[in-house]
Amino acid sequence: MPKNHPRPPSPRQRARERPAPPDAPPSRVCARLCCSDSPACEVIAPETISDWLRRAGTLVWVNVQDPGPGELEMLRKEFGFHHLALEDVTKQRQRPKVDEYPNYYFVVLYALLEGAAGGAVETIELDLFVGRNYLVTLHREPIPALQEAGRRWEATDPALRTEVGFLLHAVADAVMDAYFPLVEQIEERLEHAELTLFSGAGVLDPEEFLGIKRSLLTLRKAVYPVREVFNVFLRREHMQFHPDTYAYFQDVYDHVLRLLDSIDLERDMATGALEAQLSVISNRLNATMQRLTVIAVCVAVVGALFGAWGMNFTHVPLDNWGIAGFWTLIGSALLLVTAVLGVTHRRGLW
C-alpha cells in the first residue's frame, strides 16, 4: 500500500507560522489579502504573494512605501512587471496616465499631502499596477487617502471585496475625495478676499493671491489628466474588471469632472479678483491725483497773490491802509481759494 504523506501547509498557514525576527526593521512592504471564503482581509507575508496569486477567488493588495532596488526586484520576480514601468516608478515625475501591458495596467495618479508648509498645495506621485487579482501601489511618503481606501475596501460587500475593479475604485475615489476639502477652502478664501476688496477695508495681499493661483495650477495638473485615465477604464473591453465595477469607475469619473469644474471656476474667480484689485487701485490713484491737483491750484493762486504783493513797487498797494491792508490781502486769498474749491467740487474733482 502507498504511504500516506502529510499534506503540505497552505500558503495562509505558512504566512501565519513564519515568525518575524525579533529585531527586524519595519517592513516597507505591506501585503493584504481578501478571499471569497474569508469574512475579513488579512495581512500576509510578501514571500507568499505568488502562492496566493495562483489561487482562485483571491485579491492581493501590495502597498510599498519608499520602494528601493530590493522592493522593485521583489515586485519584478513576483509579478513580472516590465522594466520600463519599474523605471517610471524609479524616476518619478510622471504625468497622470494609464499604460496597458499584457495582463496588467500601469496607472499614475497624484495624491494630496497633508500639512504642507505655508499652506502650499503639495502632491505626491502614486503608482499603481492593476492586474486580474492584484493591486500594487507604490509611493514615496505616507498618503492618508490610502488608509481611507483600505477602510472602504474592508467595509464593502464581500461579493465585491475580491474584485480588483472595486479596489481600484476605492483607491482612486479616496485620492480624488481628498481634494474636495482643499478646493472648498480655496473657494472660501476667494470669497472672503472679494468681500474685503469691495468693502473698502484695504488692498488684497498679492502674495496670497499668487499662492492661490499656484495652488489651483497644481491641482489642475494633478486632476485634469485623470479624466482620460478613467475614460480608458470605462471601456467595456477590459477583461480584468467585472461588469459590476464599471458603475464605480463612472462614479470616480464624475468626481473628477466636479473637481475640474470647481478648479476652473476658482481660477476665473482669482483672475477676476486680481483684475478688480487693479481697477480699484487705479480708481483710488485717480481720486488721489485729483485731490492733489485741487491742492496744487489753491497753492498756486495764493502763491501768485502773495508773490505779486511782494514785488518792488514805487508805491506798495494798500500801504497806506496799515493793518487793514494786510487783512484785506488775506481775505482776498481766502476768497480766491474758496472760488477754486467751489468750481472743482462742482466738476467732481474732490
Image (cartoon, rainbow, N blue to C red):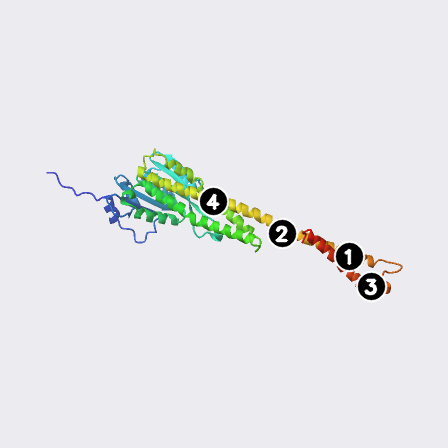
- Mark closest to the chain's N terminus, 3 or 2: 2
Which residue of the protein is positioned furthest toward the right in this rendering? 314
Secondary structure predominantly adopted by residues drawn in magenta: helix
Which amino acid type corresponds to the residue marked 3 in the rendered image? Gly
Q: Can you give x and y, in whole percent of width and height, for residue 137 in the image?
A: 36, 43
Residue holding disc 1: 303
Q: Label 4 to label 1, Cα distance in Å? A: 59 Å
Q: According to the image, label 3 marks what residue?
A: 325
Q: Can residue 112 be seen in this view?
A: no
| SS at circle 4 | helix
- The CA distance from mark 4 to mark 2 is 31 Å
> Which numbered dot is residue 83?
none
Marks 4 and 1, the one that precedes in the sequence? 4
The region drawn magenta spans 321-325
Asked if 304 appears above or below 8 in the picture, the reply is below
Mark 3 or mark 4, earlier in chain: 4
- CA–CA distance in space, label 3 to label 1: 17 Å
Residue occupying the far left of the picture: 1
Crowding at dot 4, Cα within 10 Å, few <14 / some 14-19 / many 20+, comes out as: many
Q: Indicate the amino acid at tag 4.
A: Ile
Name the kind of residue labelled 1 in the image: Gly
Which of pointers 4 and 1 indicates the residue nearer the eye? Answer: 1
- Tell me the distance, in whole angstroms, between the alpha carbons under discs 3 and 4: 74 Å
The numbered mark at residue 263 is 4
Please give the label number shown on residue 284: 2
Amino acid carrying mark 2 in the image: Arg
